[in-house]
Image: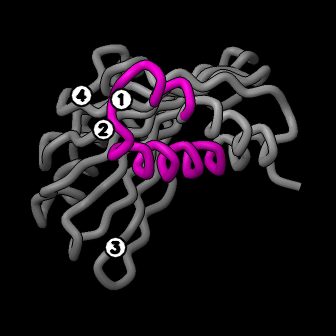
Amino acid sequence: MLSRWQQWGLLGVVLLASALLLVGCGRNDAGEKVAEGLMEKMLEQGSGGDVDVDLGGGDDVTVTTEEGTTTMSETTEWPSDMFEGVPQFTYGVVERVTRSDRADGNKAFMVYIRDMAADGPENYKKDMEAAGWQSMMSTAAGAGGMINAQKGNVALSLTYNNEDKTAVVTAYTVE
């Protein structure tokens, strides 16, 4: 049995894959409705519950279930509504942002980074420590690695791949 966060992660992966597949479908209203319906059916089968998908006619995709709402936005901006105290990752370019607001009050952000500087992870770890984050774990293997920290009821993680020059900053509430 998957934990709720694992379920949200799986839902996010399915959502991302579906959204990428639909990029070439055009942005007309009829095409969006068909795409929304197909995504809803696929996600409902995977989750076993009701799912509402809204492509929004722009660069956002929103998925709503009884457990909460997830919105994926194609953007180059750091989220203005990010948890207070989370350092902005300035060692690459923001590519997209995923926000999850769960029905139980928990929130999560995933900020996808491209064109990351080689010293980005090391510098971000220093930024986290300077902002008062307590390092929980730091691992590196080959071209990639992960840095985890916590401050109060918010956990922060940087997952990176130096070879691809990509990273994901994940911040979420913990109980």
Horizontal arrangement in the rendering, residue 18 relative to residue 128 (left or right): right
Q: Is residue 153 visible?
A: no
Going by the numbered disc 3, the residue's amino acid type is Gly
Is residue 7 visible from the viewing direction of this image? Answer: yes
| Residue beneath disc 1 | 73
Q: Is residue 167 in the magenta section?
A: no
- Quadrant in which the N terminus is drawn: bottom right
Instruction: Name the amino acid, label 2.
Output: Arg
The disc label shown at residue 144, or none: 3
Residue at the location (35% across, 43% down)?
23
- Location of residue 94 (image quadrant): top left
Q: Which residues are magenta?
A: 9-34
Residue 152 percent location from the top left of the image: 54, 26
Q: Is residue 32 left or right of residue 49?
A: left
Three-letter amino acid code at disc 4? Trp
Q: Quadrant of the C terminus?
A: top right
Element on which disc 4 rests: loop
Number of the front mark, 1 or 3: 1
Q: CA distance from mark 2 to mark 1?
A: 6 Å
Q: Looking at the image, which is closer to me, 48 or 138?
A: 48
Which is in the foreground here, disc 2 or disc 4? Answer: 2
- Tell me the CA gap for discs 1 and 4: 11 Å
Crowd rating for badge 2 (residues with CA inside 10 Å; few <14, some 14–19, many 20+): many
| Position of 146 relative to 48 (above/below) | below
Residue hosting label 2: 96
Is 24 contained in the magenta span? yes
Which callout, 2 or 4, points at the residue further toward the start of the chain?
4
Which element type, helix, strand or loop, lies under badge 3?
A: strand
| Callout in the foreground (1, 4) | 1
